[in-house]
Amino acid sequence: MAEGVVPAPPPEEPYARARALQRERSILFVACTRARSMLYISHSGRGSPFLPL
């Protein structure tokens, strides 16, 4: 969950940027809610802005 990886660098155009970030957020939500017994999230360097700590 490193910055620049999740979410991926978005396009420059504002509408495309908003759609790309929403798509990445949705994919992350589905991935996290599919975990059955445990979910482990890690990162190297700067963490994703989707997971503020």
Image (cartoon, rainbow, N blue to C red):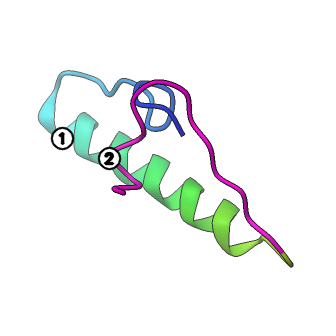
User: What amino acid is found at the position of numbered circle 1 in the picture?
Assistant: Tyr
Instruction: Tell me if mark 1 has few (under 14), some (14-19) or many (20+) residues whose alpha carbon lies within 10 angstroms of its own.
Output: few
* Left or right, residue 40 beside residue 46: right
* Residue that appears at 44% across and 29% down: 8
x, y percent for residue 6: 49, 37
* Residue that appears at 37% across and 40% down: 20
* Residue that appears at 34% across and 56% down: 52
Q: Please say if 2 is above or below 51.
A: above
* Left or right, residue 27 beside residue 17: right
Quarter location, residue 4:
top left
Count the marks.
2
* Left or right, residue 25 beside residue 37: left
User: What amino acid is found at the position of numbered circle 2 in the picture?
Assistant: Arg
Labels 2 and 1 touching (C-beta < 8 A):
yes
x, y percent for residue 28: 56, 56
Q: Which residues are magenta?
A: 38-53
> In the drawing, what numbered circle is on residue 33?
none
Quarter location, residue 13:
top left
For the residues marked 2 and 1, what is the alpha-carbon distance in whole angstroms?
Answer: 6 Å
Q: Quadrant of the N terminus?
A: top right
